Amino acid sequence: MGKIIALANQKGGVGKTTTTINLAASLATLEKSVLVIDADPQANASSGLGVDIKEVDCSIYECIIDHADVRDAIYTTDINGLDIIPSHINLVGAEIEMLNLPNRENVIKNMLATIRDEYDFILIDCSPSLGLITVNALTAADSVVIPVQCEYFALEGISKLLNTSKSRKSRLNPQLEIEGFLLTMYDSRLRLANQIYDEVKRHFQELVFKTVIQRNVKLSESPSHGLPVILYDADSTGSKNHLALAKEIINKNS
């Protein structure tokens, strides 16, 4: 049965989407079957994996609101073994429309029930908010990866997210675990980055991934080409970091 991992942090710009795209591509390169679910109305994970949003007939929005068949929303990518359910800007309004749905926190969980056995990993890219879609993602997930930018304000975001995770865990999803904290945009030359790494490590110990995602030009450039960094420049630091992360997650779950 596939493991569902949500990538969540209600602070924006911490590297959730970049991590989702490149972790998924790295897992697929390591011969795992992967499905990415783009649950962010900005749809950056979709375009970053080469999906033309204008050409999409069926997205996660149609699955949630119109109860479309989830299989109709699955699109293939340039990487063998990596599929995606794209997002749509309409998802912004979906949270209001979902308020009237029965069992509204379990929509994504029920949607994935029929297909989770077909993949080794399902990664959900959450939007930078703690709205109903993110609550759905955390309810559907087995675990959550929390990307943390190596800046002071990022630490403040963690406490808010942990409170949300705890309430989800106790009420809607008792099995929800923290897969790990992932330090992103790390620059070893900066004293602050090292201080934040030490601080997160001191607080969360074993829950912090050994792999850190370093600042990398190729990693920033690759989305504009609609490619994960492993296809854009396989020798780049960004590519090596995400492969190391993928191996760490595979080992943790084997």
Image: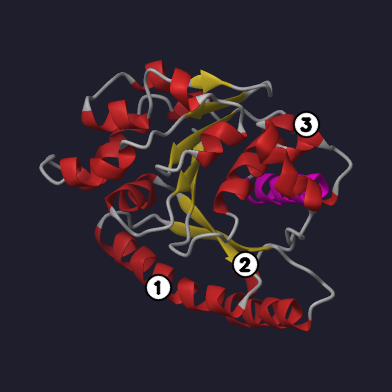
Mark 2 or mark 3: which comes first in sequence? 2
* 250 in the magenta segment: yes
Residue 130, label in figure: none
Return the x and y of residue 114 as percentages of the image width and height: 36, 25
Task: Please name the amino acid that badge 1 sits on.
Answer: Lys
Q: Which residues are magenta?
A: 238-253
Residue 69, by quadrant, is: top left
| Residue 102 location, quadrant | top left
Q: Which residue is mark 3?
A: 231
Assign a secondary structure to mark 3. Answer: helix
Label 1 belongs to which residue? 160
The local secondary structure at tag 2 comes to: strand
Count of number-bearing discs: 3
Q: Amino acid at mark 2?
A: Gln
Q: Position of residue 190 (x, y in %)?
A: 79, 78
Q: 122 above or below 85? A: below
The residue closer to the viewer here, 226 or 5, is 226
Q: Let me know if residue 188 is in the magenta part.
A: no
Q: Which residue is mark 2?
A: 149
Q: Earlier in the sequence, mark 2 or mark 1?
A: 2
State the quadrant of the C terminus.
top right
Mark 3: which amino acid? Leu
Q: Main secondary structure of the magenta part?
A: helix
184 on left or right of 52: right
Cα distance, mark 1 to mark 3? Answer: 35 Å
Q: Is residue 51 left or right of residue 175?
A: right
